[in-house]
Image (tube, rainbow, N blue to C red):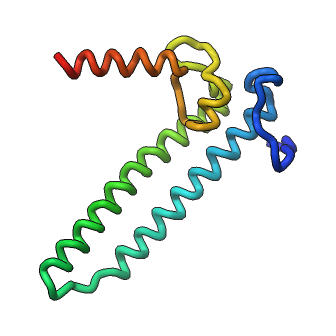
């Protein structure tokens, strides 16, 4: 998209919701986030490949394995997040980004700025979490 955004641009409630400037702002934000995650994943892979020295001390070995496991869990969570980012980018292309999947109402700029992959409004998310807790408690 060829939309110019001032460097200090922030979506505002004074504008029409999901106007071209807001869409471009969130598109850029999602792409930058995705790029950061992928770069960090590459760094992790390089680090894991370089760090193959077997620790002679069993405590050191256990500590190293624990750190690797934590790093891999973190990367797995980030891999799932990349999928959510890709889905959000598809919603931008389809024209449905920024609207609650449950109600069709606008999600809200503050929520989207804090969590650009959000698919539910705060109210719908709270209802979803209450239902989850109810089923989990049963």
Residue at position x 74%, y 26% in the image: 18
Residue at position x 54%, y 11% in the image: 103
Q: Nearer the viewer, residue 28 or 67?
A: 67
User: Where residue 91 appears, x then y in whole percent?
Assistant: 60, 30
Against 19, residue 55 (above or below) is below
Q: Quadrant of the N terminus?
A: top right
User: Where residue 130 appears, x then y in whole percent?
Assistant: 35, 17
Q: Is residue 73 left or right of residue 110?
A: left
User: Where residue 21 appears, x then y in whole percent?
Assistant: 81, 35
Against 64, residue 94 (above or below) is above
User: Where residue 124 appears, x then y in whole percent?
Assistant: 48, 16
Against 43, residue 128 (above or below) is above
Would you identify the image quadrant in which residue 107 lies? top right
Would you identify the image quadrant in which residue 48 lies? bottom left
Residue at position x 56%, y 19% in the image: 100
Residue at position x 32%, y 55% in the image: 73
């Amino acid at each position: 998209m060829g939309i110019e955004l001032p460097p200090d641009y922030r979506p505002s409630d004074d504008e029409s919701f999901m106007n071209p400037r807001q869409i471009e702002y969130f598109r850029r934000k999602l792409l930058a986030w995705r790029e950061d995650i992928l770069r960090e994943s590459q760094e992790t892979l390089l680090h894991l490949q370089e760090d193959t020295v077997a620790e002679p001390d069993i405590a050191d070995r256990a500590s190293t394995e624990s750190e690797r496991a934590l790093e891999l869990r973190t990367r797995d969570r980030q891999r799932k997040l990349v999928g959510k980012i890709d889905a959000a980018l598809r919603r931008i292309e389809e024209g449905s980004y920024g609207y609650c999947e449950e109600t069709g109402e606008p999600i809200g700029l503050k929520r989207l700025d804090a969590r650009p992959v959000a698919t539910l409004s705060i109210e719908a998310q709270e209802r979803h979490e209450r239902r989850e807790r109810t089923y989990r408690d049963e």
